Image: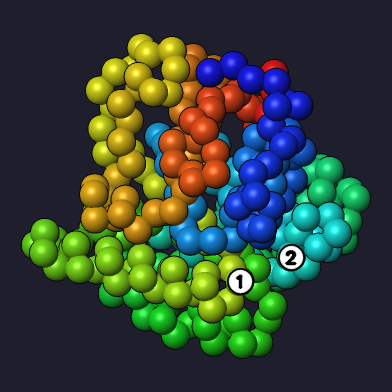
């Protein structure tokens, strides 16, 4: 689907009322009609190396911006479930991003927690996250990735489904009660067609199946074609399905045309 940036500047009434977190890229904010919604759970899914974590790190900076600049003047909680937190990349963003150059942002208000299992994740969301939010102003919660803890557990489908619903409900409660932006990075469960040109034909499905997908409010698919990166808005109540190209540089994630 082709589009002009000017076409995206007119928002509907629902989008105007909703609170958004700037992505730190004005073109991406225009596509998303304001940025990442501060309502429900936003899923960013795709194969490894597509840029999912890159955007999550950029949001950890943009949430620190003043409200007048599209941020929440708040910190972030970053839950890592499969790899160590990319601190070197964060430092590169702090040194080179336009966000960091224009405003006072730092890594001191990005609180990192490493979790390997669901037995750790559920109590973390229920107790640790609220306790931290009682002490610090937090505007963003990232789980990177939501699929990893489930892939190391040998549970029955019934128990795994119940856990996914519990985690989903906890995330929605945190969002609703704390005016929080929630991002869940997800993997893909299958890649059927590697030769498709556009996202709709790629048939990459987010991991964790229907039970988890029913807990998602918005969903964005990141993918690559040759050396180019693309994203497709797969689910959003106020947005059409739009595919766009972006780059990842030392200064961050930027949409290109």
Distance from label 1 to label 2 (Cα)? 10 Å
In this rendering, the count of numbered labels is 2
- Of residues 112 and 244, the one nearer the viewer is 244
Looking at the image, residue 137 lies above or below residue 33:
below
User: Is 144 left, or right, of 121 in this rendering?
Assistant: right
Circle 1 — which element?
Answer: loop
Q: Residue furthest right?
A: 102
Label 1 sits on residue: 179
Q: Position of residue 32 (x, y in %)?
A: 63, 40
Q: Position of residue 103 (x, y in %)?
A: 88, 56
Residue 60 shows up from this direction: no
Looking at the image, residue 101 lies above or below residue 249:
below
| Quarter of the view holding residue 159 | bottom left
Category of crowding for the residue at label 2, using alpha-carbon neighbours closer than 10 angstroms: few (below 14), some (14–19), many (at least 20):
many
Q: How is the image coloured?
A: rainbow
Residue at the image point whose x is 44% and y is 36% from the top: 234
Q: Residue furthest front?
A: 13
User: Is 114 left, or right, of 209 in this rendering?
Assistant: right
Label 2 sits on residue: 72
Category of crowding for the residue at label 1, using alpha-carbon neighbours closer than 10 angstroms: few (below 14), some (14–19), many (at least 20):
some
Q: Name the front one of labels 1 and 2.
A: 1
Q: Assess whether mark 2 and mark 1 are in contact (beta carbons under 8 angstroms).
A: yes
Looking at the image, residue 158 lies above or below residue 46:
below
User: Is 184 left, or right, of 122 in this rendering?
Assistant: right
Q: Position of residue 194 (x, y in %)?
A: 34, 17
Circle 2 — which element?
Answer: loop
Q: Position of residue 95 (x, y in %)?
A: 82, 48
Residue at the image point whose x is 30% and y is 54% from the top: 214
Residue 81 shows up from this direction: yes
Q: Earlier in the sequence, mark 1 or mark 2?
A: 2
């Amino acid at each position: 689907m082709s589009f002009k940036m000017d076409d995206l500047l007119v928002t509907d009434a629902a989008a105007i009322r909703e609170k958004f977190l700037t992505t730190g890229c004005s073109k991406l904010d225009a596509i998303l009609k304001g940025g990442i919604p501060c309502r429900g759970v936003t899923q960013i899914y795709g194969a490894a190396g597509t840029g999912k974590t890159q955007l999550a790190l950029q949001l950890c900076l943009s949430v620190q911006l003043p409200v007048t600049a599209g941020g929440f003047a708040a910190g972030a909680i970053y839950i890592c479930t499969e790899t160590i937190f990319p601190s070197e990349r964060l430092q590169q963003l702090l040194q080179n991003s336009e966000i960091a150059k224009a405003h006072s942002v730092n890594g001191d208000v990005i609180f990192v927690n490493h979790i390997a299992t669901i037995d750790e994740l559920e109590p973390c969301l229920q107790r640790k996250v609220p306790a931290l939010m009682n002490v610090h102003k937090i505007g963003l919660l990232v789980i990177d990735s939501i699929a990893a803890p489930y892939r190391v557990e040998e549970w029955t489908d019934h128990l795994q489904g119940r856990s996914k619903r519990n985690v989903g409900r906890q995330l929605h409660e945190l969002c609703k009660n704390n005016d929080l932006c929630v991002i869940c990075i997800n993997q893909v469960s299958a890649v059927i067609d590697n030769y498709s040109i556009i996202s709709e034909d790629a048939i990459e499905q987010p991991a964790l199946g229907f039970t988890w997908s029913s807990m998602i409010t918005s969903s964005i698919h990141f993918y690559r074609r040759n050396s180019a990166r693309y994203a497709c808005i797969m689910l959003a109540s106020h947005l059409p399905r739009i595919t766009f190209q972006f780059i990842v540089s030392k200064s961050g994630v930027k949409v290109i045309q």
